[in-house]
């Protein structure tokens, strides 16, 4: 019996028999396409229900005009209201799907939005990182990406893309830099997931010296731009520092042109931290650091110890505590309220 009912409702979607309202697609070129529809079905959308059953003009005319980029976007959205499923063939691009997603979001049909998100996620898996980034840029521009569901549905795909061994570390950093300019960073979890990929690539690649210092400097910029604390990520990067490499690289004289002041600050702090750790752990040993000497293990252990006071001080200076945007806004509200009370 349920199959018969489903077939009957599906046929009503196609034929428009016994329709009592009209859903109208208005494309960007001003053309109109009418879909004879049934109010009881369209009422699955909270917004359409209010438009057609409330005191709006649509309830009198029994017509609801929906602005769309393409007629088929509204047709797909409408069909979901009837048959509770969406099927996108190969001719549908992720941008087309995004337009349908926007309709689902705007007209408050949560199950439909979930169905589109799932289809988009599947399609993103077959796209390269640059195309995924382009899609995210457009999604952010529509403000749809602010929804938690949107972020969660794409996060696994994005993580999988950037974690691929075929993707270079510099490309991951570039991806995160572009994220920092979008609403995608509203989610701290997203930023941390991306930074975890960076840490993993650094650990597996054995990056040392100037390049590692540059990455820590870049991490400072990420914290400042996103307001997401990155001290723990920096701690993991410091764990990657090899003392022999420090001796060879961190003591190099600064370049005249290509090393900005912030880079020199990070380099100086790491160098000072390393040297003090080495001196404290080898206070009874009076020789210069030699990678061939087994006694240097004490210094290596001191460097990697998370409880090393000097290294914690170094992290406190390089990565000061930040106030999240939401918290900052709350502090501002409290300040204004206090000021008003005193006036």
Image: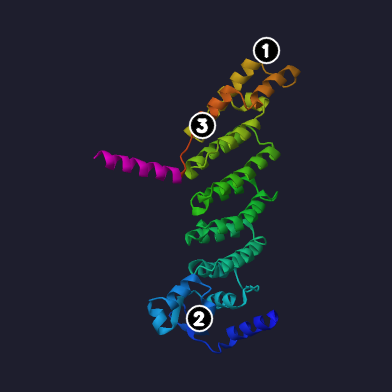
Mark 1 or 3, closer to the camera = 3
Quadrant holding the N terminus? bottom right
Circle 1: element type = loop
**Image color mode:** rainbow
CA distance separating discs 3 and 2: 61 Å
Say if the magenta span includes residue 150.
Answer: no
Q: Is residue 142 shown above or below 338?
A: below
Tag 1 residue = 287
Q: Nearer the viewer, residue 258 or 75?
A: 75
Crowdedness near tag 1: few (<14), some (14–19) or many (≥20) residues, C-alpha within 10 Å? few
Mark 3, residue position: 318
- Disc number for residue 9: none
Q: Main secondary structure of the magenta part?
A: helix
Q: Position of residue 252 (x, y in %)?
A: 58, 26
- The range drawn in magenta is 325-343
The x and y percentages for residue 243 are 66, 25
278 over 50 or under it: above or below: above
Label 1 to label 2: alpha-carbon separation: 87 Å
Looking at marks 3 and 2 on the same chain, the residue that comes earlier in the sequence is marked by: 2
Residue 326 magenta: yes
Q: CA distance from mark 1 to mark 3?
A: 30 Å
């Amino acid at each position: 019996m349920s199959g018969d009912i489903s077939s009957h409702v599906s046929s009503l979607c196609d034929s428009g028999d016994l329709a009592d309202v009209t859903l109208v697609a208005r494309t960007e070129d001003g053309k109109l396409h009418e879909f004879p529809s049934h109010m009881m079905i369209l009422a699955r959308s909270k917004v359409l229900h209010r438009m057609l059953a409330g005191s709006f003009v649509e309830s009198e005319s029994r017509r609801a005009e929906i602005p769309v980029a393409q007629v088929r976007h509204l047709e797909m959205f409408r069909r979901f209201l009837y048959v509770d499923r969406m099927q996108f063939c190969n001719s549908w691009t992720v941008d087309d799907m995004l337009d349908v997603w926007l309709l689902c979001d705007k007209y408050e049909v949560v199950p439909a939005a979930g169905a589109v998100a799932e289809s988009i996620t599947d399609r993103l898996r077959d796209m390269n990182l640059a195309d995924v980034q382009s899609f995210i840029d457009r999604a952010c521009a529509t403000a749809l990406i602010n929804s938690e569901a949107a972020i969660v549905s794409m996060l696994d795909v994005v993580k999988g893309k950037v974690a691929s061994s075929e993707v270079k570390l510099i490309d991951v950093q570039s991806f995160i830099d572009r994220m920092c300019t979008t609403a995608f960073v509203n989610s701290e979890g997203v930023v941390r997931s991306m930074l975890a990929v960076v840490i993993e690539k650094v650990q597996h690649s054995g990056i040392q010296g100037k390049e590692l210092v540059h990455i820590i400097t870049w991490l400072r910029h990420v914290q400042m731009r996103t307001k997401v604390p990155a001290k723990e990520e920096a701690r993991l990067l410091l764990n990657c520092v090899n003392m022999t490499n420090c001796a060879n690289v961190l003591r190099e004289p600064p370049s005249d042109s290509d090393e900005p002041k912030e880079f020199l600050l990070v380099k100086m702090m790491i160098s000072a931290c390393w040297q003090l750790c080495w001196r404290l752990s080898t206070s009874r040993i009076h020789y210069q650091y030699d990678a061939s000497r087994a006694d240097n293990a004490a210094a290596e252990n001191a460097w990697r110890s998370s409880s090393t006071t000097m290294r914690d001080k170094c992290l406190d200076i390089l990565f000061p505590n930040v106030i999240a945007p939401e918290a900052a806004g709350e502090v501002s509200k409290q300040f204004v309220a206090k000021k008003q009370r005193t006036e």
